[in-house]
Amino acid sequence: MTADLAIPELTAAVERPIGEATGLANRAYTSPDFFRLERERIFAPSWACLGHAADVPRPGDLRPARLLGVPLLMVHAPGGTVRVFHNVCSHRGNELVGESGRAEGAIRCPYHAWTYDLRGRLIGTPNIGGFGVHEAAGFDRTAHGLREVRSESWLDLVFVNLSGDAEPFETWIEPLAGRFERLAGAGYQRRLRPAATNGELRFDVRGNWKLAVENNLDASHLPWIHPSLNRQSPLEDHYCFLDDPRFAGQGSSAYHTVPHESPPLPRIEAWPDRTGEYPSLYPNVFVSGHADHFWTMVLEPAAPDRTIERWRSYFVDEAAEAPDFESARSAIRERWASILSEDVAVVEGMQRGRSSPAFDGGVFGPVLDPPVHHFHRWVARRLAAPGTGRAPAPAA
Ligand code: FES
Ligand SMILES: [Fe+2]
C-alpha cells in the first residue's frame, strides 16, 4: 500500500527548508489508501480528539463517535469520568450503540441483548446456554467485556490513543495547557463551562481534515475571506507561534468582544484584554481563548474529502447558563458561525483544487506560512514512522 503512495518522496519534499519545500502532495488529500495510512500512522498512535465531554454530561449518558471509521463509544461512567470503548458487541460484532442516549444502568446490544455495565463489563448473556439458561459451561464473561480505549479529558475535550502506547497524556498536553495557564492563570478551567444554550455548531465540510487545520493556522487570508473580522482584528495585529512540535497557531492582539444586549460578560481576569489565541493541537482539534469566552472545534475525518466539524463555546461562571446572558451567547455563536462558514468555503475550494494536475503541494511564503509548514512536517514525520496498532485489552 505505502509503495503506491510514494511516502518517502512525499515526506522529503515537505522536510526541506521552507523556501525550498513543497506542501503535501494531492494524494494526501484525495486517496482512500492515504486516508487508511493516516489512521494507522497519525491518528492511532497519537492523542486524537474524539469529542466533547459536554455531549455526555450525566452518568449513564452514551454517545457513539467515529475516528476515521473506527466505531467508538463515549460513556459517562459512575464517578464522573468519561470512558471510551470500542463500540462493538463482543458476541457477533454488532454495533452496540447507534445513537446518543442513556444507558439506564446497563448498555444492551440490540441484536441478542447481551448487556454490559458502564465500566464495560459483560453482565448479561441471555439464553447463551439454551432457552432460559443465561450461563454456559466454559464461557467466561470476564474475558468478553468491551474493549476499552485509552482516553483522557482536558478542557471538555475527550482524547483517545487507539494504539495504547502514546506518551503520557500529561506530558503531551502540558505545553498547550501551560500556554493557556500562563495567559489565564491557575484554576481558569474550573470557571469555564459549556454554554447551556446557543453553544454548538456543526459543519459538514466537503474537504480533507488537513485543509481545515491548515486554514486554522493561516492568518493571512483574513483580509480576503473575513473582511468584517479584519476591520476589528486586522492582520497586522496577528502573531503566530510554532515553538512546540505538538501544536501551532495564531493570535490576535486586537480582539474586541462581540456586541450584545446582555450585561458585561464575566471574564478570566488575568487574560489580557485584547488577546485572542487560536492554536491547532495536532492532529484534529482547535482551541480558542479570549477573556470572555473560549471555544473548541473537533474535526472528525469522515472520508478523504469529508470532515465533520463540531464546535462548542464556553463562558465564565454564570454566563454559561444564566438567562441574562442569552443575548451574549447567541451573538458570539452567530459571529463565529459566520466566520467559520467563510472558512468552510475556502477548505472546500482547496479540496477542489487538489484534483488539479497542475498543482501538487504548492509553496510556502516565508513570513506568514511557517505554521502551515510546521503542520505538514508533523504529518510527514508521523507518516515516516510505522504505526504500532497494539490490540486493546478487555475491560477489567
Ligand atoms: S451481537 Fe450483540 S448480543 Fe449478539
Ligand atoms: Fe479563517
Image (cartoon, helix red, strand yellow):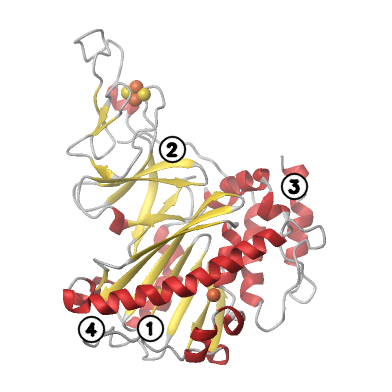
- Check whether the beta carbons of the residues at disc 1 and disc 3 lie within 8 A of each other: no
165 over 205 or under it: above or below: above
For marks 4 and 2, give the CA distance. Answer: 49 Å
Residue for badge 1: 183
Image point 23% across, 55% down: which residue?
A: 57
Disc 4 Cβ-to-ligand 2 distance below 8 Å: no
- Residue 369: image x %, image y %? 66, 77
- Residue 72: image x %, image y %? 40, 42
102 over 231 or under it: above or below: above
Label 1: which secondary element: helix
Image point 36% across, 29% down: which residue?
A: 89
370 over 360 or under it: above or below: below
Task: Answer with mark 1 or mark 2, whichever residue precedes in sequence.
Answer: 1
Label drawn at residue 392: 2
Task: Give the amino acid at mark 1.
Answer: Leu
Neighbours of disc 4 within 10 Å: few (<14), some (14-19), many (20+): some
Task: Answer with mark 2 or mark 3, whichever residue precedes in sequence.
Answer: 3
Please tell me in which quadrant of the rendered image residue 213 appears: bottom right
Label 3: which secondary element: helix
Task: Answer with mark 4 or mark 3, whichever residue precedes in sequence.
Answer: 3
Label drawn at residue 370: none
Task: Answer with mark 4 or mark 2, whichever residue precedes in sequence.
Answer: 4
* Closer to the camera in the image, 335 or 110: 335
Image point 56% across, 68% down: which residue?
A: 245
- Check whether the beta carbons of the residues at disc 4 and disc 2 lie within 8 A of each other: no
